[in-house]
């Protein structure tokens, strides 16, 4: 089986790397906070490394899941980073939600060393990572995709090659644009039901059997009604993602009026102290008197 390096052990990467180790891959991990890497190695069969160079030195596949464009530039292109220290035969896969531009830049740098590169952002949140049920949207060559497909299938519910490098990131942008509008619509609907003094759970039970049904309604309406917002993808992360969407829209000429408005609404949630609340917390700004 392939030798794997996994860089970035946050709420997503920790479980994703764990699925690989439990499948039987030889996995080495690195995290900026080294304590997390060593904690991971206590939980799973694998090696915690104190440098990226050590983690990737013999890797067939290098996987990353970090914060944003600047973090990617650091872990990939620094002197002790991935591109300069992974074998020329390695295929590099980035699961970070980032810009299409950084994916294209990193792919070009990797190709200069003979390495393959796939941008592969994921959807499904912490729960999807823990269950190994993520949706993975990939950009890259069919040849590189075929090399890493068996690896990614260890934690994928759906796995698709969307086009050349950058296509995975652009597809993830579409995903986040759709979610933003859906969550705002659901927030307004539940708030209206509350103000109308309806039995909100009964309302959801009825309308979820019809055209209003959505994943957000099925999985988040109950916790939204209860005012519980500790279920995964944080507002701070969503604002980062929507910023990427809006920047790409300015570049390609798209018009995203609802997305821009919902991004501002998430800013209101941040001002309320909800930075780490999950994205369904949009309803709280409507409840605020």
Image (cartoon, rainbow, N blue to C red):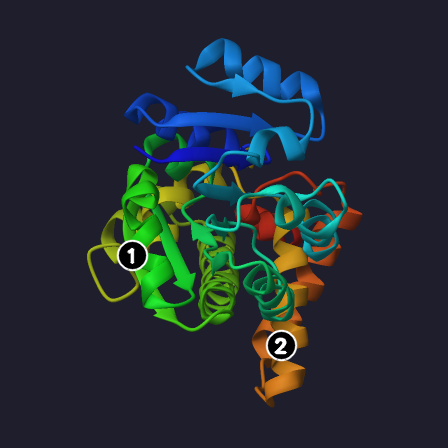
**Picture disc at residue 42:** none
Looking at the image, the residue that sits furthest to the right is 271
Circle 1 Cα neighbour tier, 10 Å, few/some/many (<14 / 14–19 / ≥20)? few
Mark 1 or mark 2, which has the lower sequence index? 1
Query: Decide: marks 1, 2 in contact (CB < 8 A)?
Result: no
The residue at which mark 1 appears reads as 146
- Compared to 287, does 181 lie above or below? below
Near-viewer residue (195 or 156): 156
Q: Position of residue 22 (x, y in %)?
A: 33, 22
Q: Position of residue 228 (x, y in %)?
A: 53, 34
Residue 160 found in image quarter = bottom left
Residue at (68, 66) in percent of width and height: 243
Res. 9 visible in picture: no
Query: For this view, does 192 lie left or right of residue 268?
Result: left
Residue at (26, 54) in percent of width and height: 208
Residue at (56, 49) in percent of width and height: 279
- Quadrant for the N terminus, please: top left
- Disc 1 secondary structure class: helix
Query: For this view, does 122 lie left or right of residue 88?
Result: left
- Compared to 235, does 53 lie above or below? above
Residue 37 found in image quarter = top right
Query: For this view, does 10 lie left or right of residue 201?
Result: right
The residue at which mark 2 appears reads as 248
Looking at the image, the residue that sits furthest to the left is 209
Q: Position of residue 140 (x, y in %)?
A: 42, 66
Near-viewer residue (199 or 101): 101
Near-viewer residue (76 or 184): 76
Q: Position of residue 274 (x, y in %)?
A: 70, 42
Looking at the image, the residue that sits furthest to the bottom is 253
Q: Nearer the viewer, mark 1 or mark 2?
A: 1
What distance separates the C-alpha of mark 1 from that of mark 2? 28 Å
């Amino acid at each position: 089986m392939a030798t794997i390096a996994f860089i970035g052990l946050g709420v997503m990467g920790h479980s994703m790397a764990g699925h690989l180790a439990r499948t039987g891959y030889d996995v080495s991990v690195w995290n900026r906070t080294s304590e997390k890497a060593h904690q991971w190695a206590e939980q799973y069969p694998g090696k915690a490394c104190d440098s990226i160079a050590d983690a990737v030195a013999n890797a067939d596949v290098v996987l990353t899941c970090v914060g944003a464009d600047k973090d990617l530039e650091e872990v990939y292109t620094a002197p002790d980073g991935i591109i300069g220290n992974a074998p020329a035969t390695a295929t590099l896969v980035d699961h970070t939600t980032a810009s299409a531009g950084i994916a294209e830049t990193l792919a070009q740098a990797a190709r200069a060393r003979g390495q393959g590169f796939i941008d592969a952002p994921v959807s499904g949140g912490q729960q999807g990572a823990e269950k190994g049920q993520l949706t993975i949207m990939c950009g890259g060559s069919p040849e590189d995709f075929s090399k890493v497909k068996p690896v990614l299938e260890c934690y994928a519910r759906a796995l698709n090659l969307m086009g050349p490098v950058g296509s995975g990131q652009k597809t993830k942008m579409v995903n986040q644009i759709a979610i933003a509008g859906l969550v705002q619509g659901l927030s307004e609907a539940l708030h209206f039901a509350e103000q109308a003094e309806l039995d909100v759970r009964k309302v959801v039970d009825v309308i979820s059997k019809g055209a209003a049904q959505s994943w957000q309604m099925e999985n988040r309406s109950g916790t939204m009604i209860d005012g519980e917002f500790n279920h995964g993808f944080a507002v701070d992360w969503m604002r980062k993602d929507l910023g990427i969407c809006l920047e790409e829209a300015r570049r390609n000429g798209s018009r995203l009026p609802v997305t821009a408005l919902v991004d501002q609404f998430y800013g209101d949630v941040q001002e309320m102290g909800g930075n780490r609340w999950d994205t369904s917390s949009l309803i709280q700004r409507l409840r605020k008197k």
